[in-house]
């Protein structure tokens, strides 16, 4: 399933790019992230909890930076399995694109290819897409707050 969300922040593209290079700062903005452990350059272990409808799960994921072009885009891949709650697994490929706006801010485009198995996967694409939009809205608000601080 592919999900794409677009939002704008008032900060210039170079500032937003530097922010995204600091995975621990980015993780603080992602709803549900409990911890991030740096395993190597561009490789991380992430623990995150999510609830979709009445089902919740905590996932442990291995995330890696799969590609980047400074100031333009970053790509990440993640593979994980549940360690608490509903039994399941997930796989994603995420691309974050940065483009300057006419007002001097940055348009951020998040595109995710997500595959979810187990109980959460059984909820269907629509429920997962709704949750994804909700998470992106919360992430965008947290990102704006971090950049304005």
Image (tube, rainbow, N blue to C red):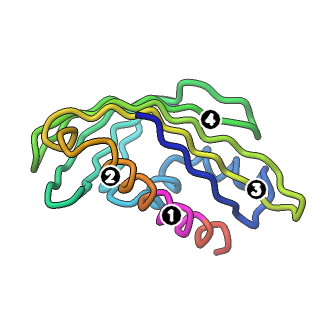
On the image, numbered disc 4 is attached to which residue?
Answer: 74
Question: Spatial distance from mark 1 to mark 4, Cα to Cα?
Answer: 19 Å
Per the model, the C-alpha gap separating discs 4 and 3 is 15 Å
Neighbourhood count class around disc 4 (C-alpha, 10 Å): few under 14, some 14–19, many 20 upward: many
Q: Which mark is residue 137?
A: 1
Between marks 2 and 1 in the image, the one whose residue lies nearer the viewer: 1
State how far apart marks 1 and 3 are (Cα).
16 Å
Disc 4 from disc 2: Cα separation: 21 Å
Which residue is depicted at the point 69% across and 61% down? 8
Residue numbers of the magenta segment: 136-143
Q: Is residue 119 above or below residue 54?
A: above
Q: Is residue 142 left or right of residue 129?
A: right
> Does residue 39 appear to the left or right of 12 in the view shown?
left
Q: Give the SS element for disc 3.
A: strand
Q: CA distance from mark 3 to mark 2?
A: 27 Å
Which of the labelled discs sits on residue 35, or is there none? Answer: 2
Secondary structure state at the residue bearing disc 2: strand
First in residue order: circle 1 vs circle 3: 3
Residue at the top extreme, as displayed: 66
Mark 4 and mark 2 residues within 8 Å of each other at the beta carbon? no
Say whether marks 4 and 3 touch (CB < 8 Å).
no
Closer mark to the observer between disc 1 and disc 3:
1
Q: Earlier in the sequence, mark 2 or mark 1?
A: 2
Taking 85 as reference, is 75 above or below it?
Answer: above
Q: Considering the whole magenta stretch, tell me its main secondary structure.
A: helix
Q: Is residue 140 above or below residue 66?
A: below
Residue behind mark 3:
106
Residue drawn 78% across the image and 46% down it: 99
- The spot of residue 15 in percent (x, y) is 75, 55
């Amino acid at each position: 399933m592919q999900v794409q969300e677009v939002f704008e922040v008032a900060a210039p593209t170079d500032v937003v790019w530097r922010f995204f290079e600091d995975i621990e700062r980015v993780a603080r903005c992602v709803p549900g992230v409990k911890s991030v452990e740096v395993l190597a350059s561009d490789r991380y272990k992430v623990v995150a909890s999510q609830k979709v409808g009445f089902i919740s799960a905590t996932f442990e994921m291995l995330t890696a930076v799969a590609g980047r072009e400074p100031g333009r885009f970053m790509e990440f891949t993640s593979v994980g399995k549940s360690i608490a709650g509903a039994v399941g697994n997930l796989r994603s490929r995420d691309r974050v694109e940065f483009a300057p706006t006419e007002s001097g801010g940055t348009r951020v485009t998040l595109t995710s290819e997500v595959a979810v198995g187990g109980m959460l996967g059984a909820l269907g694409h629509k429920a997962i897409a709704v949750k994804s939009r909700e998470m992106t809205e919360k992430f965008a608000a947290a990102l704006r707050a971090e950049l304005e601080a």
